[in-house]
């Protein structure tokens, strides 16, 4: 059973603090979840490279692709690996840097009011059952903590930055996630 503590940390998730975050603007309600997909190196799973990437410690010499991203300052609130295990990088009360230039319902800078959840995956590889189960449990908890996160405010990165991003991709089963969320109410 998960819960959120007073510092905005998901318990009992592992917490690895990222330097790539800052304070949310004053008087901004958390009212959206953005689902992402990531694998490092691209298309490879289980390499444990997301943590050093989000924590600003990625070794650019470890893989040719890493040279192109090592200087990026990126984070998410949560990362769910292929087995459904969660690592938290940024407390929910802070702004993670996951959305980049983004727009949702005429509101820019989605990082200001959203929670970013990265799933280990690609646009073309189906996500695992354990990931859907964990994601649904976490979103249900977030909706209780932040009631302005309504079903229509659970979106993909591609929904808020369609010119730049495609994740979590066409293989992500939104219908199944919504069924799990309805079943958990």
Image (tube, grey):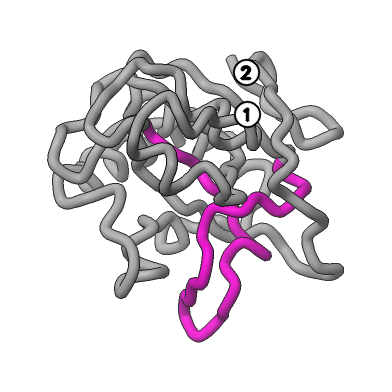
Crowdedness near tag 1: few (<14), some (14–19) or many (≥20) residues, C-alpha within 10 Å: many
Residue 105 colored magenta? yes
* Tag 2 residue: 13
Residue 14, quarter of picture: top right
Front residue of 58 and 168? 58
In the rendered view, does 152 fall on the left or right side of 92?
left
SS state under label 2: loop
Front residue of 105 and 56? 56
Labels 2 & 1 near each other (Cβ < 8 A):
yes
Q: Residue at x 49, y 41 (%)?
A: 117
Counting from the top left corner in percent of width and height, residue 59 is at 53, 28
SS state under label 1: strand
Residue 110 colored magenta? yes
Q: Residue at x 57, y 27 (%)?
A: 52
Q: Residue at x 60, y 72 (%)?
A: 109
Q: Residue furthest front?
A: 61
Number of residue marks: 2
Tag 1 or tag 2, which sits nearer the N-term? 2
Counting from the top left corner in percent of width and height, residue 72 is at 55, 51
* Tag 1 residue: 88
In the rendered view, does 180 fall on the left or right side of 90?
left
Q: Which mark is residue 122?
A: none
Q: CA distance from mark 2 to mark 1?
A: 6 Å
The N terminus: image quadrant: top right
Counting from the top left corner in percent of width and height, residue 66 is at 42, 37
In the rendered view, does 173 fall on the left or right side of 120?
left
Instruction: Tell me the magenta residue range.
Output: 92-120
């Amino acid at each position: 059973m998960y819960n959120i503590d007073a510092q905005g940390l998901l318990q009992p998730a592992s917490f690895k603090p990222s330097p790539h975050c800052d304070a949310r603007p004053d008087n901004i309600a958390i009212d959206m979840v953005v689902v992402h997909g990531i694998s490092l190196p691209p298309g490879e799973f289980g390499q444990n490279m997301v943590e050093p990437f989000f924590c600003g410690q990625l070794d650019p010499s470890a893989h040719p692709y890493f040279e192109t991203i090592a200087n990026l300052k990126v984070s998410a609130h949560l990362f769910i690996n292929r087995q459904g295990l969660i690592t938290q990088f940024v407390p929910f009360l802070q702004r993670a840097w996951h959305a980049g230039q983004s727009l949702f319902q005429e509101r820019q800078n989605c990082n200001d009011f959203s929670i970013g959840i990265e799933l280990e995956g690609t646009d073309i590889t189906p996500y695992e059952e354990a990931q859907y189960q964990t994601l649904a449990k976490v979103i249900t908890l977030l909706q209780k903590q932040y009631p302005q996160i309504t079903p229509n405010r659970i979106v993909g990165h591609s929904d808020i930055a369609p010119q730049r991003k495609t994740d979590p991709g066409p293989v992500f089963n939104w219908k199944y996630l919504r069924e799990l969320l309805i079943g958990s109410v």
